[in-house]
Amino acid sequence: MKTPKIASIENRPGTFLGGLRNVILNSKETDGDVYLVQGIMPKGSAVPLHVHELEDEIFHVMEGKVELMLGDEIIQGKKGDIIYLPRGIKHAIKTYGEETAKVLNYVIPGKNFEEFFNKMNKIGLDASTAEKAKIAIEHKIKFL
């Protein structure tokens, strides 16, 4: 039986490959269904173009502005915007403008993606491209 949970965006700050993240709901707490993380993206932050085979994502822009590539389209997201990304769609995200962006990232289902994040964080920024690619392939995520 699943248990309700009250969470806060002030829950558990941490880092991911040099950036800041705040895990709000981990997949253990949601029985693998959802992984909810707040990304804190200073000016110049970017997540490269990639595709998830297993997960849908929802980005909720809480502060600042972001630029997203969704398929072949580029859009700007501002505070309050909610962007749905179905699995199988290539996408990338970066800050837009001069201010730090804060984005809630809902990943559904969450377990596989959280495991990917944790493994990537563990090997660190200095890991080889081959090491990073191996982890991505294991988790059915393809960087383009």
Image (cartoon, helix red, strand yellow):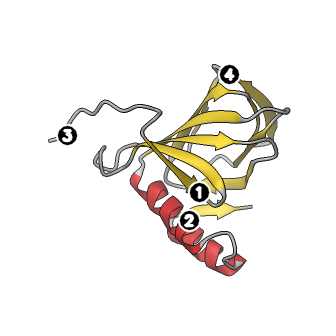
Mark 3 vs mark 1: give the one in front: 1
**Rendered residue at 54%/63% (across/down):** 140
Amino acid on which disc 1 is placed:
Phe
Q: Secondary structure at mark 4?
A: loop
Residue nearest the observer in this picture, 100 or 127? 100
Q: CA distance from mark 3 to mark 4?
A: 32 Å
Circles 4 and 1, Cβ within 8 Å, touching? The answer is no
Q: Secondary structure at mark 3?
A: loop
Instruction: Estimate how packed mark 3 is, as few (under 14), some (14 to 19) or many (20 or more) residues with alpha carbons within 10 Å.
Output: few
Circles 2 and 1, Cβ within 8 Å, touching? The answer is yes
Mark 2 vs mark 3: give the one in front: 2
Instruction: Quarter of the image for the C terminus: give it.
Output: bottom right
Residue nearest the observer in this picture, 101 or 105? 101
Amino acid on which disc 4 is placed:
Lys
Q: CA distance from mark 2 to mark 1?
A: 6 Å
Q: Is residue 120 above or below residue 19?
A: below
Instruction: Pick whichever of labels 2 and 1 is earlier in the sequence.
Output: 1
Say left or right for 21 vs 142. left
Q: CA distance from mark 4 to mark 2?
A: 28 Å
Q: CA distance from mark 4 to mark 1?
A: 23 Å
Residue 121, labelled with which disc?
A: 2
Say left or right for 123 vs 109. right
* Residue at the spot of label 1: 16
Residue 15: percent from left, percent from top: 57, 55
**Rendered residue at 66%/58% (across/down):** 18
* Residue at the spot of label 4: 79
Residue 2, labelled with which disc?
A: 3
Rendering quarter of residue 143: bottom right
Instruction: Pick whichever of labels 4 and 1 is earlier in the sequence.
Output: 1
Instruction: Quarter of the image for the N terminus: give it.
Output: top left
Residue at the far left: name it. 1
